[in-house]
Image (cartoon, helix red, strand yellow):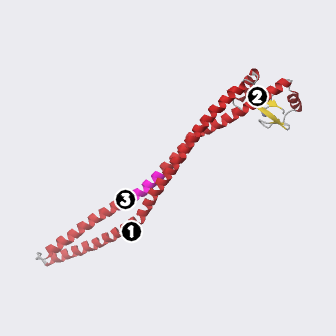
């Protein structure tokens, strides 16, 4: 039946539109996930930079604490030294001297700790600065990528509208009954309702077809369906 063969070829062409639309929709559906992943990357990088900043701030607070301790020790040494002259008792004098020596030793230890902290802060300052610069660049890069992805999704939407219009026009060439059947089959079959016979196999599921089925498809008197996936078979 020449007509049926023609109908099936028209249907097969119509399916090209459906496949394109499905691919575009699939692409659009993936966009929110891709954007969320980019945003997560930005957030992770921010958290990392914040941790580096916090480390520096902690060192700086610790230094201030030590400086306050140092100040107190210095004052104590000055106060005790001033009081030395007015002490009459030898024992008290000796005790005071010991106390001053101890405070001086403590002061020296705190000074060493402050120096050590300053060395660490000098090492950490460029680390923080680099992290902040890198974060800024990374954020810009990610944001421009996100806007590219959003633009491409918009273009996909436009393409879909365009293809759907063409499909709508083309669809009238296809026999309505066959079209309805095709629509039913393609649901849940990757959007493919009609497939070519590929050698001896179904072009949809890959199953080797019975020779009788291939023969029937060749003759094309009636619609022929794959035993396995139920798609319409077309022998070109
Ligand atoms: Zn099949």
Residue 175 is covered by the magenta coloring: no
Mark 1 closeness class: few <14, some 14–19, many ≥20 residues within 10 Å = few
Picture coordinates of residue 31 (x, y %)?
A: 57, 40
Q: Which of labels 2 and 3 is toward the front?
A: 2
User: From the Cβ of disc 1, is ligand 1 less than 8 Å away?
Assistant: no
| Camera-side residue of 123 and 130 | 130
Q: Which residues are magenta?
A: 45-59
Quadrant where the N terminus sits is top right
Residue 53 is covered by the magenta coloring: yes
Measured Cα–Cα span from mark 2 to mark 1: 77 Å
Q: Which residue is mark 1?
A: 119
Asked if residue 73 is positioned above or below residue 197 in the image, the reply reads below
Is 98 on the left-hand or right-hand side of 14? Answer: left
Picture quadrant of residue 219: top right
Q: How many marks?
A: 3
Picture coordinates of residue 132 (x, y %)?
A: 44, 56
Q: Can you tell which mark lies on residue 11?
A: 2
Asked if residue 70 is positioned above or below residue 174 in the image, the reply reads below
């Amino acid at each position: 039946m020449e007509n049926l063969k023609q109908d099936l070829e028209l249907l097969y062409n119509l399916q090209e539109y459906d496949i394109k639309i499905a691919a575009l929709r699939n692409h659009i559906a993936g966009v929110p996930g891709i954007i969320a992943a980019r945003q997560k990357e930005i957030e992770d990088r921010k958290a990392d930079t914040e941790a580096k900043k916090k480390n520096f701030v902690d060192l700086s607070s610790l230094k201030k604490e030590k400086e306050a301790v140092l100040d107190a020790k210095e004052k104590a040494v000055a106060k005790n030294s001033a009081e030395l002259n007015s002490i009459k008792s030898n024992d008290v004098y000796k005790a005071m001297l010991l106390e001053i020596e101890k405070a001086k030793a403590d002061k020296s230890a705190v000074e060493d700790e402050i120096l050590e902290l300053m060395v660490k802060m000098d090492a950490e300052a460029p680390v923080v600065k680099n992290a902040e610069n890198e974060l800024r660049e990374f954020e810009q890069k990610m944001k421009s990528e996100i806007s590219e992805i959003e633009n491409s999704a918009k273009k996909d939407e436009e393409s879909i509208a365009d293809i759907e219009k063409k499909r709508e026009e083309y669809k009238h060439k296809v026999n309505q009954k066959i079209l309805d059947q095709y629509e039913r089959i393609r649901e849940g079959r990757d959007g493919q309702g009609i497939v070519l016979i590929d050698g001896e196999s179904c072009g949809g599921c890959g199953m080797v077809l019975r020779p009788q089925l291939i023969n029937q498809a060749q003759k094309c008197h009636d619609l022929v369906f794959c035993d396995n996936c139920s798609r319409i078979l077309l022998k070109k």
